[in-house]
């Protein structure tokens, strides 16, 4: 169909607006100058080497992977049964219950972070790691409930009843009949929750301590004291990671599933 | 026995949410209402302070401005994407999704490079000779607005594409056949039908900007505080837990009120549309 020229121009400008800033980061990561400048002088990979030699960044990277994986798995373990119960049975107060499970997504991240800091670190005096894990569990749970919930809503539960009639136990029917049918939803919710948790700042910012600092928090601290292209280099590496993840999602689910 | 199953399945989640979300929230909120007796004193004194009020208004007005800019840029872009052939639409959607999946620290850092005193814009303008002294753009309201639009525009676009894709293309063509030029047809046909998407997108952008931490922290700094950075400063730098609790409640309440307002607008528009039809 023919398009209005003005429309095309606006769309082009918007995409330029979205990508030029990222393009500038990519370019600056190769500059030889010890402070970030654009256009760059010279060409070097030194800042990439520097990323791997900066311990605080590498340690936080491993911590972030660990926290996000554990939190997402915990959210799946708790969230899938809950989503199943909400979709399968007419529980009393079903809507209120569902809103409650989705509510961590409605509360500002800084509020969740601060509340957990007060409760876990100050009052219960538990290690920060636990607080960080719980915080990331909370922000991951709504993704599981929403995405797995909508897969379950589309499932015809009579196939499960057939399995029961044929003598299968409830658990076995759930594992062998229900789970395989909501596989795509589970994978999509896992990806969404993992990426969101890995990128989260507000919750992590309050729950950081010696040796326990999430990567985005470390990166933010680094930016406050340094203005060298190491940040650009790390940003490029993370963007490459994002592209790889998007590629995996596209090949398995189709990106439309998560947008 | 049958009826017990759902409760057993729901219990672990309910317990975790009650113990590690509800209880912590009560822990920070309760002291703001109670000091020996029930009181709103903390809130009254919060709003009696000029500086606090300025942070509150900055947060609201920036969130509103960002939402409007995202609507203005998002609607045409989403329309463009929705009308692109299937082959290219996937690529454009992926390009919109990519910034959204990129860490917000990176996306804010991008604008430090551009807006800073030694940033791309100042460099360019000084080299050309338009200015002799760098313009202060970083740590201003302007920087927070640009950074927030950058953060949330993709979210608005993706929300809108889903809605616009479902609008019957023939209606637009009918309007054109009946003599409306394309711009008018867009305004009178596509725009009203996109309203539900605009409302959903606006709620996401507004509440997102209102509670974002990274962008105001990196682009506004200590000079231009928003509620989220102000909460962090009170809680972690100043150790003023009472104020931090008050700000937390204000953020939650504001978010709820704004969502209700948007939903009311949506309901009203819906009703009006119904009367015309």
Image (tube, coloured by chain):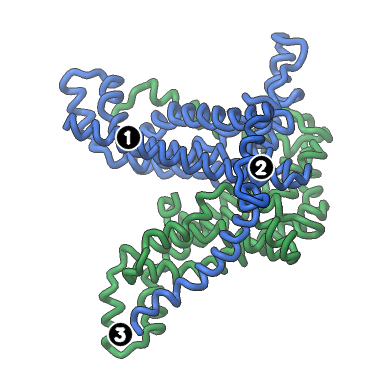
Chain colours: A green, B blue
Hey, which residue is sitting farthest bottom in the picture?
A: A167
Q: Quadrant of the C terminus of chain B?
A: top left
The residue located at (69%, 62%) in the rendering is: A120
> Percent x, y for residue B189?
25, 28
Q: Residues within 10 Å of mark 3 (few under 14, many from 20)?
A: some
Q: Earlier in the sequence, mark 1 or mark 2?
A: 2
> Percent x, y for residue A198?
62, 55
Q: Nearer the viewer, mark 3 or mark 2?
A: 3
For the residue pair A158 and A107, the one nearer the viewer reads as A107
> Percent x, y for residue A229?
77, 39
The residue located at (17%, 23%) in the rendering is: B177
Q: Residues within 10 Å of mark 1 (few under 14, many from 20)?
A: many
Pointer 1 and pointer 3 on the same chain: no
Q: Quadrant of the N terminus of chain B?
A: bottom left
- Badge 1 element: helix
- Alpha-carbon span between mark 1 and mark 3: 45 Å
Pointer 3 and pointer 2 on the same chain: no
Name the residue that disc number 3 marks.
A164
> Percent x, y for residue A135?
62, 59
- Subunit under mark 1: B
- Badge 2 element: helix
- Alpha-carbon span between mark 3 and mark 2: 51 Å
Q: Specify the quadrant of the image occupied by residue B145.
A: top right
Name the residue that disc number 2 marks.
B105
- Subunit under mark 3: A
Residue B127 is marked as none
**Residue A84 seen by the camera:** yes
Pointer 1 and pointer 2 on the same chain: yes
For the residue pair B11 and A221, the one nearer the viewer reads as B11
Name the residue that disc number 1 marks.
B194
**Residue B84 seen by the camera:** no
Q: Is residue B230 above or below residue A116?
A: above
């Amino acid at each position: 169909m023919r398009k209005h020229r003005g429309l095309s121009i606006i769309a082009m400008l918007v995409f330029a607006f979205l990508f030029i800033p990222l393009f500038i980061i990519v370019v600056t990561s190769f500059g030889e100058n010890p402070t970030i400048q654009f256009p760059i002088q010279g060409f070097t990979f030194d800042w990439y080497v520097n990323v791997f030699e900066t311990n605080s960044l590498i340690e936080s990277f491993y911590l972030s992977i660990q926290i996000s994986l554990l939190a997402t798995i915990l959210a799946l373990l708790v969230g899938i049964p809950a989503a199943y119960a909400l979709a399968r049975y007419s529980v009393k107060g079903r809507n209120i219950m569902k809103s409650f499970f989705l509510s961590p997504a409605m509360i500002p991240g800084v509020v969740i972070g601060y509340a957990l800091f007060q409760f876990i670190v100050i009052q219960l005096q538990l290690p920060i790691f636990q607080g960080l894990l719980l915080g990331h569990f909370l922000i991951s749970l709504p993704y599981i409930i929403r995405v797995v919930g909508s897969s379950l809503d589309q499932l015809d539960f009579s196939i499960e009843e057939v399995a029961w009639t044929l003598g299968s136990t409830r658990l076995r029917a759930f594992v062998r009949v229900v789970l395989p049918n909501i596989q795509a939803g589970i994978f999509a919710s896992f990806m969404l929750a993992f990426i969101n948790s890995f990128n989260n700042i507000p919750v992590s910012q309050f729950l950081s301590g010696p040796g326990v600092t999430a990567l985005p928090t470390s990166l933010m601290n680094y930016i406050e004291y340094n203005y060298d292209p190491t940040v650009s280099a790390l940003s490029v590496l993370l963007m490459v990671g994002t592209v790889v993840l998007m590629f995996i999602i596209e090949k398995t689910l189709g990106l439309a599933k998560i947008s | 026995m049958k009826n017990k199953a759902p409760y057993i399945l729901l219990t672990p989640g309910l317990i975790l949410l009650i113990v590690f979300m509800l209880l912590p929230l009560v822990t920070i909120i309760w002291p703001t209402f109670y000091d020996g007796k029930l009181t709103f004193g903390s809130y009254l004194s919060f709003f009696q302070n000029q500086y606090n009020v300025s942070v509150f208004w900055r947060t609201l007005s920036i969130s509103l401005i960002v939402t409007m800019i995202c609507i203005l840029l998002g609607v045409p872009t989403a329309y463009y994407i929705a009308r692109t052939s299937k082959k290219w639409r996937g690529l454009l959607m992926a390009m919109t999704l990519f910034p959204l999946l990129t860490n917000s620290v990176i996306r804010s850092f991008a604008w430090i490079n551009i807006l800073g005193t030694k940033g791309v814009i100042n460099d360019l303008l000084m080299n050309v000779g338009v200015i002799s002294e760098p313009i202060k753009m970083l740590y201003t309201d302007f920087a927070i607005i640009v950074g927030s639009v950058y953060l949330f525009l993709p979210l608005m676009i993706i929300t809108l594409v889903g809605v616009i894709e479902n609008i019957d293309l023939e209606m637009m063509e009918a309007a054109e056949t009946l003599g409306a030029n394309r711009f008018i047809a867009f305004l009178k046909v596509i725009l009203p039908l996109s309203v539900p998407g605009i409302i959903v997108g606006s709620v996401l952008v507004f509440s997102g900007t209102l509670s974002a931490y990274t962008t105001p922290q990196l682009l506004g700094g200590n000079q231009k505080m928003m509620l989220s950075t102000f909460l962090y400063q009170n809680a972690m730098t100043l150790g003023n837990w009472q104020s931090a609790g008050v700000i937390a409640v204000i953020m939650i309440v504001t978010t709820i009120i704004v969502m209700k307002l948007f939903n009311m607008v949506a309901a009203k528009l819906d009703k009006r549309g119904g009367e015309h039809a």
